[in-house]
Image (spheres, coloured by chain):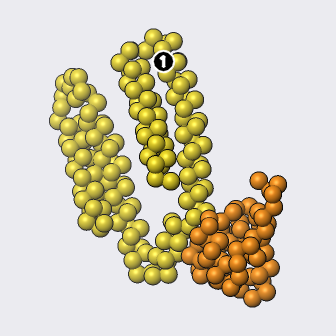
Amino acid sequence: MKNRLEELRKARGIKQEELADAMEVSRQTIGSLENGRYNPSILLAFKLAKYFGMSIEDIFIYEEDSE
Amino acid sequence: MKRVDYFVTVIGVLLLGTGLYLVKTIESAQGILLTLPYVLVGVGCGVFGYGMSNIISKKAIAKDASLQKRLAVEQNDERNIAIANKAKAKAYDLMTYVFGMLMLTFALMNVDLTATLLLVAAYLFVHIYGIFYRVKYEKEM
């Protein structure tokens, strides 16, 4: 699943480490999310959406044939 | 948890000590006593090592709050948990075939029936355990 995490994080001038600390996950998890290698749990998706003050759909882009 | 670590370490030392004592004192060993001392030494070393490593690692991080937090994050990280579970599932799938082949080999080699049946029982136990948890999670999720 594609997402706008890297774009949003960089726009706010936040490091991966800082976002990882705020989400209570490892920096590798943030890196994998940004690369689209890992899809987050619904809880982490909600935490990220809340952190950026957006909805989940604004951050994560659902594509029908991405599965 | 600290008490448990010390307890485990002491148990390890006791097992190791008993094993070494039996190795030195038993002269004409027969039956189970032929291997028991060495099993005790092996298990004792393992238990002692496990307990001691827990004590040392806990002492090492006790004074560093940021390190403690980082370790907790690493342990509870959902991606790390997902990776560990996926790796375990792969190993379990492989184990099914490896044990299956091993049982077949034991049967063809005419290995003692007790050993073969024990292996079959262990194999079935693991699979029944898997089915039990599948049913349990079907109800819970």
Q: Chain A is drawn in which colour?
A: orange
Which chain does tag 1 point to? B
Percent from the top left, x then y, of residue A42?
62, 67
Chain in yellow, by letter, is B
Question: Does residue B135 sit above or below B5 in this rendering?
Answer: above
**Left/right of residue B80 with respect to residue B39 in the rendered view:** right
Q: Name the residue under label 1.
A: B106
Percent from the top left, x then y, of residue A38?
70, 62
Label 1: few (<14), some (14–19) or many (≥20) C-alpha neighbours in 10 Å = some
Position of the N terminus of chain B, as image quadrant, is bottom left
Question: Does residue A11 sit above or below B140 in this rendering?
Answer: below
Percent from the top left, x then y, of residue B36?
26, 33
**Left/right of residue B97 with respect to residue A10 in the rendered view:** left
**Mark 1 residue type:** Phe
Q: What element carries label 1?
A: helix
- Could you tell me which residue is drawn at 40 percent across and 81 percent down? B63
Percent from the top left, x then y, of residue B102?
52, 24
Q: Can residue B34 be seen in this view?
A: yes
